[in-house]
Image: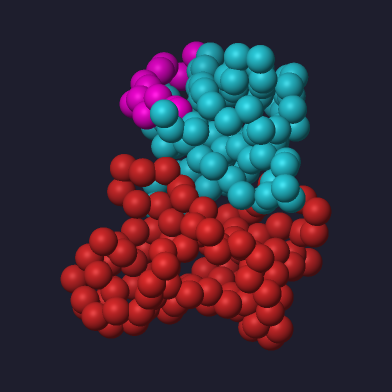
Chain colours: A cyan, B red
Amino acid sequence: QKEVEQDPGPLSVPEGAIVSLNCTYSNSAFQYFMWYRQYSRKGPELLMYTYSSGNKEDGRFTAQVDKSSKYISLFIRDSQPSDSATYLCAMSARSGGSNYKLTFGKGTLLTVNP
Amino acid sequence: NAGVMQNPRHLVRRRGQEARLRCSPMKGHSHVYWYRQLPEEGLKFMVYLQKENIIDESGMPKERFSAEFPKEGPSILRIQQVVRGDSAAYFCASSPVGVTEAFFGQGTRLTVV
């Protein structure tokens, strides 16, 4: 079982739709959770960062962490064509001072159609 | 993420040659990380460095790969005697002290022919 599982998609939605992206994980030591956006042939761009469980909102983006289910989500409201990209979840553990080491999902390719 | 500078952006090497990838972290960041992204694979951690110190190289292949972050100048990821399987995108990230989230550069795409 991979430490982090993410449906690769592709996911295609019309402009204005609500998008839900998800990852599951198996390592219960993970406490830091991030979402990155990666445009084609570019570097990952940090979108959201959450520590432990709960919700975090930033503009059109909401990140949710459910540690009991080992499940994290990213919601995008009022999706725009400019949101078309690959979305990567990433997480790290706190134990042993290794919170810097990010474990990534493979990414979900999202296309928002005008 | 424009603050983390990587060069070159594209690098083509013949099998057996050496590849040197450079990374300058964001201003004020003293921690540098290298990740590799193989086709159809997620980003994989390779190494974590601070100035003049390798902190964690648990993700580095045992042979042919090395990394450094000298007191002056950029961090260097060096791949000796490259093979076709080394073809990938190599990303550098940096962070300030005590911060978990990392900011990535645009990557170096290495092609071994």
Q: Is residue B91 visible?
A: no
Pinpoint residue A34: horizontal percent, then vertical percent.
Answer: 63, 36
Pinpoint residue A74: horizontal percent, then vertical percent.
Answer: 58, 23
Q: Residue at x 73, y 41 (%)?
A: A94
- Left or right: B113, with B43 as reference point: left
Q: In the current view of this chain or complex, which residue is farthest to the bottom?
A: B72
> Magenta stretch: residue B15 in it?
no
- Of residues A54 and A103, the one nearer the viewer is A103
- Left or right: A15, with B19 as reference point: right
Q: Quadrant of residue A62?
A: top right
Pinpoint residue B88: horizontal percent, then vertical percent.
Answer: 34, 59
**Number of dots carrying numbers:** 0
Q: Quadrant of the C terminus of chain B?
A: bottom left
Q: Quadrant of the N terminus of chain B?
A: bottom right
- Of residues A76 and B43, the one nearer the viewer is B43
- Of residues B83 and B8, the one nearer the viewer is B83
User: Magenta residues, as a range?
Assistant: A5-17
Pinpoint residue B44: horizontal percent, then vertical percent.
Answer: 47, 50
Residue A47 against residue A101 in the figure, above or below: above
Q: Residue at x 34, y 72 (%)?
A: B11
- Of residues B28 and A92, the one nearer the viewer is A92
Q: Is residue B102 visible?
A: yes
Residue A41 against residue A1 in the figure, above or below: below
Q: In the current view of this chain or complex, which residue is farthest to the left?
A: B113
Q: Residue at x 69, y 85 (%)?
A: B72
Q: Residue at x 75, y 32 (%)?
A: A51
> Magenta stretch: residue A6 in it?
yes
